Amino acid sequence: MRQLLLLRHAKSSWDDPATHDKDRTLNARGRRSAILMRDTMRALGLVPDLILVSSARRTIETLEHLEPWDESPLIETMDSLYLASADHLLATLRDVAETVRGVLVIAHNPGLHDLALHLVARGTLHAPSALRGLTEGFPTAGLAEFSVPGPWHGLNSGGGRLARFLTPRGLEENG
């Protein structure tokens, strides 16, 4: 069984309208949310072997706030993940080596949310509250955890079992 973690970048700053979208940094709320997600991931034992991260500044900073890792994952920064569609994200995951057991993708909406919904397209009965949360949206610093029973190259619609969907707001409310 493989593990797929989809993490939307944390909240970015819009303070400087002249800043190009790809160069926007995290704001204070985003930094706090990324640290909260790091602590939650550690508590749950969510440690990927491979991290695929968009080259946008806000995704890189989100990753930096998740570090350090107990076990050092391989990190691939990819320009092609910047504002990538669900189809492109899925194609990228299909190219992951079969020896990789856990992947964390740090990317952007709407592609990330579309991918998550695509993976549960056939329904998920074992995590109804997680599915309900996911269908409502994929907020910044939100994390979807999937179990993937088959090989990466065969990942397709309905090919992931949603284990949990976590948001900073939900973690703070249940804290």
Image: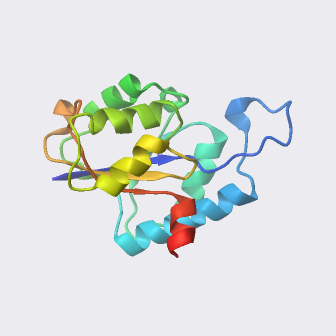
Instruction: Name above or below for residue 114 compared with residue 38.
Output: above
- In the image, 154 versus 117, the foreground residue is 117
Q: Residue at x 36, y 39 (%)?
A: 116
Left or right for 22, reference 123: right
Question: Based on the displayed image, in which of its 4 quarters is residue 49 positioned?
Answer: bottom left
Q: Residue at x 50, y 73 (%)?
A: 174
Residue 100 in percent (x, y) is at: 24, 49
The residue nearer to you, when weighing 97 against 66, is 66
Q: How is the image coloured?
A: rainbow
Q: Is residue 5 visible?
A: no
Q: How many marks?
A: 0
The front one of 143 and 151 is 143
Residue at the image point whose x is 57% and y is 46% from the top: 9
Q: Where residue 40 sits: x, y (%)?
A: 46, 69
Task: Determine whether, in the image, residue 126 is placed left or right of residue 28.
Answer: left
Image coordinates for residue 86, horizontal then vertical, percent: 40, 27
Q: Residue at x 32, y 26 (%)?
A: 91
Whether 174 is drawn above or below 86: the answer is: below
Image coordinates for residue 106, horizontal then vertical, percent: 48, 45
Residue 63 in view here: yes
Q: Quadrant of residue 22?
A: top right
